[in-house]
Every structure is written in C-alpha cells, then in structure tokens.
Amino acid sequence: MMTRNDADRVMIECNSRYYFHPGYYIQEVVEESGLSQQDFARELGISHKTFVRSQYQY
C-alpha cells in the first residue's frame, strides 16, 4: 500500500490536477513482469542506466 509520503513523491500537480510520474507506472510493470531492471532494460533495447534514469526522475 502506498503511504502519504510515497504519494507526495510520485504525484505531479498540473493545472489543478494530479498525475503520477510515468516512472511509477513503469515500476509496476517491471514488478509484474518478474524481470530484473537489467533484464527489462535489455528487452526494451536500452541501457540499464537509461532505464533507471527514466524511472526515478520524480
């Protein structure tokens, strides 16, 4: 379950609306796939470093 601190960290306010950072959704997909971040990045054809940066820039 997401705590209030987690929600504050991943939510973005824009025009009086709140959105989750795309990295939040990517993290869920990776967890559900059962792959490691390294393997997931390889499947996408990107480096692990690029993958981590895209996921955590929130």
Image: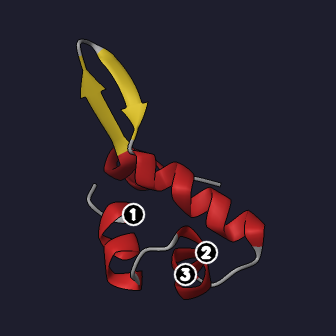
For badge 1, the amino acid type reads Gln
The residues bearing labels 3 and 1 have C-alpha atoms spaced at a distance of: 15 Å
**CA–CA distance in space, label 2 to label 3:** 4 Å
Image mark for residue 47: none
Please state which of residues 43 and 20 is positioned toward the viewer in this rendering. 43
Label 3: which secondary element? helix
Percent across and percent down for residue 52 are 37, 74
How would you rate the neighbour count of disc 1 (Cα within 10 Å): few for under 14, some for 14-19, many for 20 or more? some
What number is the disc on residue 42? 3
Q: Which residue is mark 2?
A: 43
Q: Residue 28, percent across and down?
A: 63, 58
Q: Quadrant of the N terminus?
A: bottom right
Q: Position of residue 57 (x, y in %)?
A: 26, 60
Q: Is residue 43 above or below residue 54?
A: below
Q: Earlier in the sequence, mark 1 or mark 2?
A: 2
Mark 3 or 1, nearer chain start: 3
Q: Is label 2 in a helix, a strand or a loop?
A: helix
Give the label on residue 55, or none.
1
User: At 24% from the left edge and 21% from the top edge, which residue is drawn?
Assistant: 14
Label 1, label 2: how far apart the Cα atoms are: 16 Å
Three-letter code for the amino acid on which mark 3 is drawn: Arg
